[in-house]
Image: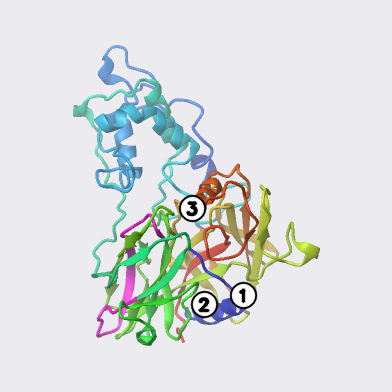
Amino acid sequence: MHLACTRSRLASLVALALAACNNDVIDPGEDDTGAGSGGTTQADGTTAGTSAADTGAAALRPNWHEDIAPLVHASCTGCHREGGIAPFSLETYALAEGLAPLLGDTVVAGTMPPWGALETDECQPQHRWKDDLRLTDAEKQLFIDWAAEGAPEGDPAKAAPLPTPPSLELADPTLTLQNPAPFTVGGKQDSFICVAIDPAVDKDVWITGVQMVPDNAKVVHHVLVYVDRMATSDGLVDANSTFPCEGFVSFDGAMQIATWVPGAVPTETPPEIGFPMPAGSRIVLAYHYHPTGAGDEVDQSSIALRWTEQKPSINGVMGLFGNGDGLEPGPNDPNGVPVFHIPANVADHTETMSVTIPDWLPKTPIFTLGTHMHYVGVDMRMWIERGGQEQCLIHTPRWDFNWQRNYTVDAPVADMPYIQGGDIVRIKCKFDNTLGNPFLVKALAEQGLSEPIDVELGESSLEEMCLLLFGLATDLPLD
């Protein structure tokens, strides 16, 4: 997502977006420390990785039907299914058997299921995340033991019940809108275009779910979704309902409600929260297209919306912070003057930004968080300084551009983390601008380059960002 953020923009964001608006600590040992140290005792007394000698091969544990299939269906087949976004299906034993070693390696490495927000030595959030796909150490060990035993199928008659796979589709959409005209992406330059669509709402409604449906994921780099509450875009569009828009949409009445990035899941608000969409509003989709370099590609994406006519108890507001706003001095700054600059062939460059929340802002719950960088980025963390104490809210230490998403807090609104007047919000991004970064190597190759270049703050894929995405719950007026 290529979004230029300035201090004036942040000031207006705080004034408009913010004004518009402990639970148990997750044990990091369960999520990101690799496989456990030993086998897992099963209900029949056998140990994972061993067999019950008197019952034959069908009793080998762990096996597909009793142990592995429930885990795969709970955490994997939302993507790894027939027609899914993953390159192969894992829905049946026949499809998964030959991949047993790969499954063991990837779950232990933590690369699958994809989940970026981790508990680390630097960050121990006091909240859990909704729809957390991560496996426990014991569950990871089951995959290792299953592969070591030769991936036994087990007895279908003893198969454990299969959970419903995680859905990547927005439940019960009210309306799906397609871009009125196709857009052609070609050459080597990124394209930035806004599409305005009339949802034809003749009464006030509140949006509770948003899902972008990219038509051509090869070129859709990101999409920002706005409600144009004053239909201002009517005076900007051409015959195809488009207008150029690099960076933020900032005209009167525009309010961001969602972001789509690779790996994103539908945006859904907690039950008490909704994004207001007054009668006569427009939906504006701000696209960043990144060409493949291999010829023209055409995109005509869609958006699904779910709304209610019943006013929620709290308004929701989405916002952004970073991209050089509040930039602090850092390494490689010339003469100590803060500048967002990542030199070529530097593997451990950092950029840090901060903002002090205005004193008048009351306690305001945060219901969702996300991090964003490009291909040079490798690690991002956000924390709050309050009363001399630090509270880390999100850390994505293994940044992967292909698996971005917002992370929704799993707590009642009253128990969510919050910001308030006097807080200092800080974000820190780490970058690897060397050929040891495989994501950078790929991005360079797409531009016909073989060596790193100096990287600045900017919109294109070979420029960089350090950007926090957040959702706030507030009962303050929007205007």
Of the numbered discs 3 and 1, the one sitting upstream in the chain is 1
Apparent side of residue 161 relative to residue 16 in the rendered image (left or right) = left
Q: CA–CA distance between discs 3 and 1?
A: 29 Å
The answer to whether 398 is drawn above or below residue 260 in the figure is above
Q: Nearer the viewer, residue 337 or 386?
A: 337
CA neighbours of label 1 inside 10 A, class few (<14), some (14 to 19), many (20+): some
The answer to whether 62 is drawn above or below residue 443 in the figure is above
Q: CA–CA distance between discs 1 and 2?
A: 9 Å
Identity of the residue furthest to the left in this view = 157
Q: Secondary structure at mark 3?
A: loop
Nearer the observer: mark 3 or 1; the answer is 3
Apparent side of residue 237 relative to residue 476 in the rendered image (left or right) = left
Q: Quadrant of residue 350?
A: bottom right
Q: Secondary structure at mark 2?
A: helix
Of the numbered discs 3 and 2, the one sitting upstream in the chain is 2
The answer to whether 98 is drawn above or below residue 70 in the figure is above
Instruction: State which region is magenta.
Output: 196-220
CA neighbours of label 3 inside 10 A, class few (<14), some (14 to 19), many (20+): some
> Where is residue 141 shown, x and y percent of the image?
44, 30
The residue identified by callout 2 is: 18
Q: Amino acid at mark 2?
A: Leu
The residue identified by callout 1 is: 357
> Where is residue 384 shown, x and y percent of the image?
62, 64
Kindly tell me whether residue 48 is visible in this rendering. Answer: no
* Magenta residue check for 213: yes
The residue identified by callout 3 is: 401
Picture residue at 55% right of the left edge, 64% below the top: 467
Q: Quadrant of residue 42?
A: top left
Q: Are marks 1 and 2 in contact (CB under 8 Å)?
A: yes
Q: CA–CA distance between discs 3 and 2?
A: 28 Å
